[in-house]
């Protein structure tokens, strides 16, 4: 949550991130995970600082299991 530049909360923003990895043993070196993000409000980018936007993103990431164990 980010408060806007004026005295009220009307021009702030709200962001939620989530990451989910399927429940299986670490049998691969690079294990996949699903990443989602929801952003609503003002100022996510310099181009949209004065407009309220809502965006939802989904992505796929990889975690290196060997780097975690060291």
Image (cartoon, rainbow, N blue to C red):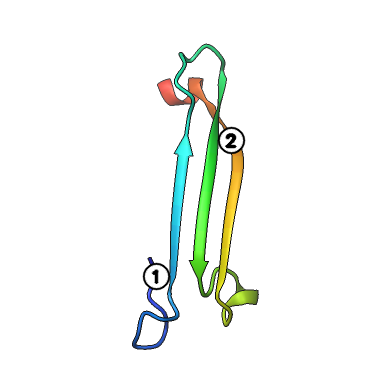
The quarter of the picture where residue 52 lies is bottom right
Q: Quadrant of the C terminus?
A: top left
Q: Position of residue 53 (x, y in %)?
A: 57, 70
Answer above or below: position of 19 versus 37: above
In the displayed structure image, the side of residue 49 where residue 70 appears, left or right: left
Asked if residue 46 shows in the view, the reply is: yes
- Disc 2 crowd, CA 10 A, few/some/many (<14, 14-19, 20+): few
Q: Position of residue 68 (x, y in %)?
A: 44, 25
In the image, which disc is placed on residue 61?
A: 2
Answer above or below: position of 4 versus 55: below
- Dot 1 lies on which element? loop
Q: Quadrant of the N terminus?
A: bottom left
The quarter of the picture where residue 69 lies is top left
- Disc 1 crowd, CA 10 A, few/some/many (<14, 14-19, 20+): few
Of residue 62 and residue 15, the one placed in the foreground of this image is: 15
Query: Where does label 1 land, which residue?
Result: 2
Circles 1, 2 touching at the beta carbon (< 8 Å): no
Q: Residue at x 58, y 35 (%)?
A: 61
């Amino acid at each position: 949550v980010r408060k806007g530049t004026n005295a009220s909360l009307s021009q702030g923003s709200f962001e939620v991130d989530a990451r989910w990895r399927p429940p299986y043993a670490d049998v691969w070196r690079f294990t996949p995970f699903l990443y989602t993000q929801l952003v609503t409000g003002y100022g996510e980018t310099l181009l949209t600082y004065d407009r309220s936007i809502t965006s939802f993103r989904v992505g796929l990431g990889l975690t290196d299991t060997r780097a975690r164990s060291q």
